[in-house]
Image (cartoon, helix red, strand yellow):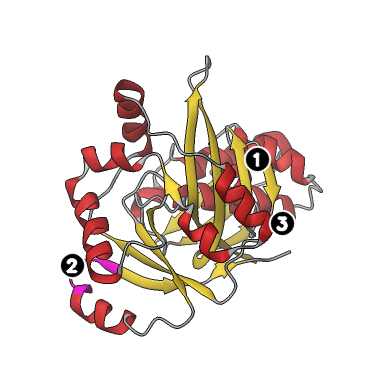
């Protein structure tokens, strides 16, 4: 039995550069992992079919979803003749902009590689991941990075966020990434300049970094979900707008917290029945 954590991903910066001729979008992102994680258990089996997935999220047990497709690809091309049973303890909410499916898919690539001693390199696993989704190559790693292109250009960085945590607030809304990008292609994406954030990372200037946080998908997601917009407005009104940004294509809104956050308990007590709310730490594993 092999057990692996699949950490949630947050976007501290996201800019849509443009639409490519192949239908994908070129992006500029500053990504990090947080210590909210799904837990995956891998076990070789002699049973048929060759891939079986169990989960507390019944959707993941249905053939044809992303996790099945990735697992079948790994078995068919790299572990021929093997069979595997995967159990997914799902903790990352779906449709939240936290890359729950992508980080599970990345864990499956790593888990099958490790369980069957395939000795695939990082670049080989990145290439496999890129066949299935732009977030998967980055999700193979548990440290912050600047990510560009279609998720295939990854540069690891040290973020100036020491002594910071992240407050996650998710409304009861499911936003499909595909819907957000399709609408963005129709009405246009707001553009964000990456340079101020790069300068803040280079100088390790925490205040400048937080001031540079932005997400060019917000306008689109807010058009699709008024509740997501209201969530961000509520956080800004209650706690101030500094360090508040949507993650991914939503619906999660997050706030970077500098130092101790004495207001968190009061905020949690006030809104816990309406939102999923928790504090998380940024993961940085070598």
Q: Which residue is mark 1?
A: 74
Q: Give the camera-side residue of 201 and 15.
A: 201
In this rendering, is residue 139 above or below 132?
below
Name the outermost residue toward the top: 21
Q: Nearer the viewer, mark 2 or mark 3?
A: 2
- Image position, residue 169 (x, y; %): 32, 64
Q: Residue at x 64, y 47 (%)?
A: 109
Characterize the local packing of mark 2: few (<14), some (14-19) or many (20 or more) Cα atoms within 10 angstroms: few
Q: Which residue is mark 3?
A: 115
- Image position, residue 237 (x, y; %): 22, 65
Q: What is the magenta range? A: 271-276
Q: Which residue is mark 2?
A: 274
- Image position, residue 248 (x, y; %): 42, 47
- The numbered disc on residue 260 is none
Residue 39 left/right relative to 145: left
Task: Give the spatial CA distance, label 2 vs label 1.
Answer: 40 Å
What is the total number of numbered labels drawn onto the structure image?
A: 3
Q: Secondary structure at mark 2?
A: loop
Task: Give the spatial CA distance, label 3 vs label 1.
Answer: 12 Å
Q: Give the camera-side residue of 271 and 8.
A: 271
| First in sequence: mark 2 vs mark 1 | 1
Q: Give the camera-side residue of 84 and 212.
A: 212
């Amino acid at each position: 039995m092999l057990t692996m954590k699949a950490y949630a991903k947050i976007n501290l910066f996201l800019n849509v550069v443009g639409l490519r001729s192949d239908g994908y979008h070129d992006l500029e992102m500053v990504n990090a992992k947080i210590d909210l994680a799904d837990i995956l258990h891998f076990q070789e089996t002699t049973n048929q079919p060759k891939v079986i997935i169990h989960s507390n999220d019944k959707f993941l047990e249905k053939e044809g979803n992303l996790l099945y497709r990735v697992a079948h690809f790994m078995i068919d091309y790299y572990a021929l003749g093997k069979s595997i049973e995967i159990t997914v303890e799902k903790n990352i909410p779906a449709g939240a902009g936290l890359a729950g499916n992508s980080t599970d898919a990345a864990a499956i690539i790593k888990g099958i590689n490790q369980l069957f001693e395939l000795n695939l390199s990082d670049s080989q696993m990145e290439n496999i991941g890129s066949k299935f989704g732009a977030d998967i190559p980055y999700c193979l790693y548990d440290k912050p990075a600047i990510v560009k292109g279609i998720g295939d250009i990854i540069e690891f960085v040290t973020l100036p966020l020491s002594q910071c945590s992240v407050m996650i607030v998710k409304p009861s809304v499911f936003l499909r990434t595909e819907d957000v990008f399709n609408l963005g292609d129709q009405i246009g994406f707001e553009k964000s300049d990456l340079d101020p954030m790069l300068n803040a990372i280079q100088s390790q200037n925490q205040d400048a970094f937080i001031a540079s946080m932005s997400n060019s998908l917000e306008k689109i997601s807010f058009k699709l979900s008024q509740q997501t917009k209201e969530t961000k407005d509520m956080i800004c009104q209650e706690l101030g707008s500094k360090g508040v940004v949507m993650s991914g294509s939503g619906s999660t809104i997050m706030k970077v917290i500098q130092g101790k956050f004495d207001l968190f308990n009061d905020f949690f007590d006030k809104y816990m029945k309406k939102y999923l709310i928790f504090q998380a730490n940024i993961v940085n594993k070598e």
